[in-house]
Structures are given as structure tokens and as C-alpha cells.
Amino acid sequence: QVQLVESGGGLVQAGGSLRLSCAASGLIFSINAMGWYRQAPGKQRELVATITKGGSITYAEFVKGRFTISRDNAINTVYLQMNSLKPEDTAVYYCHAPSISGTRDYWGQGTQVTVSS
């Protein structure tokens, strides 16, 4: 089992910044990529960004140039720096890590990000 614990959400005005953190614990050797998804009310959960242990990064088009994902492998933590936030970025943000075997998906409990206009 892998446990993912997010922190750093909150309320911010449009144009502001927030930094999310996700700490992984447990069977760390069973995961490689870690990332962030988000789910707004009434919408499907969508990919925001992912990063592998080796540093390969994928971003959703709607966050390119505004969000930055990074990772500290020494402490098994992934970060999402969110700048130039927009009201449409309002959502619950979830940390995610698929198992290397492809048989499990691990999710954090989610952290609320609210951007006011």
C-alpha cells in the first residue's frame, strides 16, 4: 500500500499563487510516476501534471506556463506550484500515483483550491 497526503490548498484571488504538496509513504518502491488531478463540481476528474522519478514531466494544456510540478525523491514528495490562478482552476486537487505493475492506483484525500474573481 502507498499512502498519499496532500496539503497546501486554500482560497486565493485570481492572479494569485498556491503551492500544493503531496507526501508519499508506505511501499514507495512500487511507484514511479506521481502527479496531480483535479475535479471541479459537476465535472470529470482531469489530469493536471505528472512527473516520474527521473524527472520526465507531462502537463495538461490548460496549465502550461502557469503551473510547475516538481519532486523531491529523497523525501518522496511531489509539489505543484500554481501561479496566475484563474477562477476556472477552482477544484479539488488530488495527488495520484499508479503502481509500476499497473494493477493499483493510489489517490490522496484531495485538497480544495478556490480561486475568487
Image (cartoon, rainbow, N blue to C red):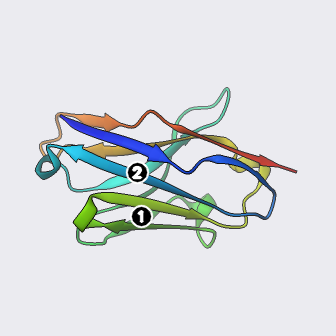
Task: Give SS at disc 1.
Answer: strand
- Horizontal and vertical percent for residue 51? 35, 63
Residue positioned most to the top: 42
Query: 7 left or right of 102?
Result: right
Instruction: Decide: few, some or many residues near mark 2? Use Cα within 10 Å; few <14, some 14-19, many ≥20.
Output: many
Residue at 28% x, 36% y is 105
Query: 3 left or right of 11?
Result: left
Indicate whether 85 appears above or below 116.
Answer: below
Q: Which mark is residue 85?
A: none
- Horizontal and vertical percent for residue 4? 34, 42
- Horizontal and vertical percent for residue 96? 37, 44
Of tags 1 and 2, which is closer to the observer? 2
Q: Which residue is mark 2?
A: 22
Q: Which residue is mark 1?
A: 58
Identified by mark 2, the residue type is Cys
Q: Earlier in the sequence, mark 1 or mark 2?
A: 2
